[in-house]
Amino acid sequence: MKGKMAIIGSDDSVFAFKAVGVDAYSAFSPESAESLLKKIAKEYQIIFITDVLAKGMDEIIKRYLNSAYPVIISVPSKNGSNGYGMESIKATMEKALGVDILFNKDNE
């Protein structure tokens, strides 16, 4: 499993990742992406999921936060970001550090 990476997203969104050697899996709904994630989670260390799909899979992604691997990272799709990835990173950092270092505000 050392260093294996995959991406889950629509065909158009995963094309660039596939070009650089990342294993690409096509999914067009959060449900199909969730099924794929469950199948490949033990095989990869890093799994990218387009944020459009990831937003609809929030609960299952949170379950993987307690595991060392796979690391699940939300990335923008070919149509751009919906903000889910940044919000997820912000919430995780606030939980770990107790402060919002991205926008430099203390938790209230």
Image: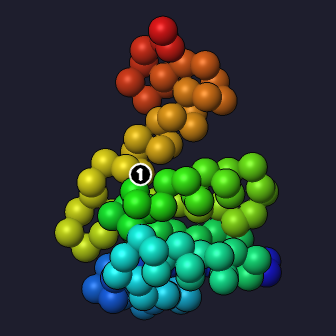
Q: Total of numbered circles in the picture? A: 1
Q: Is residue 81 left or right of residue 2?
A: left
Q: The residue tagged with tag 1: helix, strand or loop? A: helix
**Outermost residue, left direction?**
79
Q: Is residue 2 left or right of residue 91?
A: right
Q: Is residue 96 above or below residue 23?
A: above
Is residue 20 in view?
Answer: no
Q: Quadrant of residue 68?
A: bottom right
Q: Quadrant of residue 56?
A: bottom left
Is residue 65 in view?
Answer: yes
Per the image, the residue denoted by label 1 is 85
Q: Position of residue 102 (x, y in %)?
A: 43, 29
Q: Position of residue 97 (x, y in %)?
A: 63, 24
Q: Residue at x 31, y 48 (%)?
A: 83
Q: Residue at x 57, y 33 (%)?
A: 93
Q: Is residue 9 above or below residue 49?
A: below
Q: Quadrant of residue 77?
A: bottom left
Q: Residue at x 61, y 51 (%)?
A: 62
Pick the front one: 55 or 15:
55
Q: Position of residue 98 (x, y in %)?
A: 61, 19
Image quadrant for the N terminus?
A: bottom right
Crowd band around label 1 with a 10 angstrom C-alpha radius: few (<14), some (14–19), many (20+): some
Indicate the colouring scheme.
rainbow
Q: Is residue 31 above or below residue 63?
A: below
Pick the front one: 32 or 93:
32
Q: Residue at x 28, y 86 (%)?
A: 12
Q: Is residue 1 left or right of residue 63?
A: right
Say which amino acid is labelled 1: Gly
Pick the front one: 30 or 70:
30
